[in-house]
Image (spheres, rainbow, N blue to C red):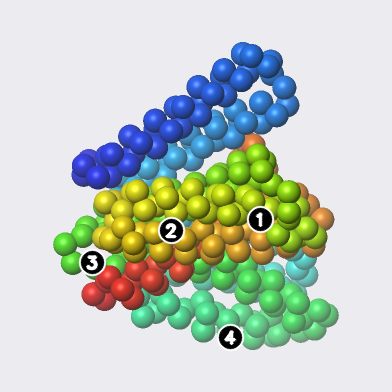
Amino acid sequence: MNWPDRELGCLIIGTFIALGCASLMGLILRWQCGPTKTIENLNSRIMAWWFMILVFLGAVLSGPIVVVVLFGLLSLLALREFLTLTPTRLGDHRALFWAFFVVLPIQYIILGIHWYAFFSIFIPVYVYLILPIRSAAAGDVQNFLTRTAIIQWGLMICVYCLSHGPALLTMLEIPDYPTRDGKLLCYLVLICEASDVLQYVCGKLFGKHPVAPKVSPSKTWEGLIGGVALTVGLGTALWWVTPFSPQAAAGMSLTICLAGFGGGLVMSAIKRDRGVKDWGQAIAGHGGILDRLDSFCFAAPFFFHFTRYFYSTI
């Protein structure tokens, strides 16, 4: 296990302090108000955050290969949730076998060997063309276009987009900045998740006007504006963890917040179409893996490519 440098160590300590304060508040509320359903749900969410952060930080401190393996497992679980909730037919089974046991492992092997040129086009170009051929060869034409789009969307969101998180460790070379110690990935995860939490809190406190009431009545303009403003302030204050200037950190944080909000809205539209509240029950108090990763899946590609274009030498 790699010992974190001073900046990463400060980020980890700050995260533990914030979680400790949240846990203390949860205990105080339980002591004052009793074990109500809302407070028990809040405490379950906080306990789940402890578990998720400890697993994530354990992987980051163990090195890039462990992070790649962790995200590969997350992609597997997320893709399973996505395809479980969306209808497929017997004629799709061979294409699904390719998606789970060929495409997904290859995408993460490419990450592990640092092959950026193939990483960027493998799923959007080659898999996009080959998987429909495999489905067509099965001979089932009923709802063919819809079924094909479901599998391709699942791979794009749960594998391709999600794999841009560990790509921050393996696919970037930034002068005078160590990318492989995980600080950029920690920054992305922290800003993305803080944006979700602060938008939720601001929405609960001040929310009156839904952004898209037929998709997600809980996402309000007040929650969006308040949550984004607070998160951009946090992202700017943490500029010293990144290779960015304070102004660039503010721009990157704003990009993460807006892309993450859009991702949450899109995934909510899919859940509403399928008539469910959550993608699954894998994480107590949070729902499924995709309920926790929906905003990250959309924010990670923007953050990775902006960082690569403006800062990386490869």
Q: CA distance from mark 2 to mark 3?
A: 19 Å
At a point 18% along the width and 67% down the height, the residue shown is 175
Q: CA distance from mark 2 to mark 4?
A: 34 Å
Q: Secondary structure at mark 3?
A: loop
Q: Given the image, on which type of amino acid does mark 3 rest?
A: Ile
Q: CA distance from mark 2 to mark 1?
A: 18 Å
Q: Residue under circle 4?
A: 129
Left or right, residue 8 beside residue 67: left
Left or right, residue 65 beside residue 122: left
At a point 32% along the width and 42% down the height, the residue shown is 11
Please rate how many residues cluster around mark 1, counting C-alpha atoms within 10 Å: few if below 14, some from 14 to 19, many from 20. some
Q: CA distance from mark 3 to mark 1?
A: 37 Å
Q: Residue under circle 1?
A: 221
Residue 31 lies, with reference to residue 198, above or below; the image says above
Q: Given the image, on which type of amino acid does mark 2 rest?
A: Ser
At a point 55% along the width and 49% down the height, the residue shown is 227
